[in-house]
Amino acid sequence: MDSDHSVKEAIRVALHQAGACRVGFAAAEPIDQKVAASYAAWITGGNHGEMNYLDRYHDVRNDPRLLLDGARTIISCAFDYRPSLRHPLFADYSLGLDYHEVIRQRLAPVTEYLCRRFGGQMRICVDTAPIRERYWAARAGVGIIGLNGLLIVDGVGSKVFLAEIIWTEEVSPDLSRLGESCKQCGACLRACPGKALKGDCTLDARRCNSYLTIEYRGELPDDLKLPGRIYGCDICQDVCPHNRTAGTTSLTEFTPSDALLRLDTEAISRLTPETFNQIFRHSAVRRTKLSGLLRNLQKNQK
Ligand code: SF4
Ligand code: SF4
């Protein structure tokens, strides 16, 4: 019979081989009541803008056991996406292939293997279920939550995608890092163009360029300025000292495509539905659609 330690180490090794840069374990249980209450107040304050999906399934969000019958463990994984090449108009996370597809494809064979070896059932979540991803990553010891609201992994920084594997078997939890602070330098708060960061590790999405350029569907606010990126933002990550020593990802799927790197404002203004689909077929940028990208571009050129 495998010991708790050897099971966890075997899972860690398998997930690192699948590309995760950090893996941690937490007991599947209802989330901390104070955290649940803060989230409810954040929603009541309208800080989620028009992301109405964030105001649904509160019962599941507060208790991940509802996502899988018999859930006992949450395995949190972080995947480094920091690219070696950047684009002045697109956020780093969007330069490679859509992480939802990439990470699921990487995790699916591993979870099959782990269930065969250790039993139980596993469910993969890659931003595809109402689960408090950063909370569970901090609870599982994968990283800390910074004042910019992002999960920061020691030595890797905040340019990570998060995924969770919910498992019906039990292993011992790793040391929680929930409540641990970032360096608290305030650089992200000062640099945020819309003053969206509230100083309590949350933001007002309605003032966030990332939300406005990706999620928001209407006319952009008159006073919004977009001199830089037209898809996403990255500013509160770029100024963060936790990102200064970070290297770049070794995951080839997150390498920017040449077609995307070649796009400048003029080329974007000439995109047709066909060329947009060609370039962004497997990209997160599809989310804003061509109309959204052109809307953002207009703002950038004002
Ligand atoms: S992504 Fe940009 S606009 Fe949004 S909170 Fe960070 S710095 Fe502010
Ligand atoms: S920029 Fe400073 S305050 Fe903001 S998350 Fe990074 S360390 Fe924390």
Image: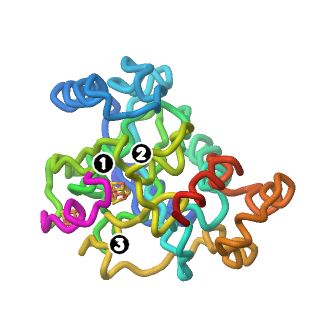
Q: Marks 2 and 1, how far apart in space? A: 7 Å
Range of the magenta residues?
184-195
**Camera-side mark, 3 or 1:** 3
Q: Residue at x 49, y 20 (%)?
A: 69
> Which image quadrant: the N terminus?
top left
Asked if one can make out residue 172 in the rendered structure from this viewpoint, the answer is: no
Mark 2 vs 1: CB contact within 8 A: yes
Q: Secondary structure at mark 2?
A: strand
Which numbered disc flags the more N-terminal residue, 2 or 1?
2
Q: Whole-percent x and y of residue 31?
A: 26, 29
**Amino acid carrying mark 2 in the image:** Ile
Label 1: how many Cα within 10 Å (few below 14, some 14–19, many 20+):
many
**Is 194 contained in the magenta span?**
yes
For disc 2, the marked residue is 75
Q: Position of residue 10 (x, y in %)?
A: 47, 57
Say what amino acid the circle numbered 1 marks. Answer: Ala
Which of the numbered marks, if any, corresponds to residue 264? Answer: none
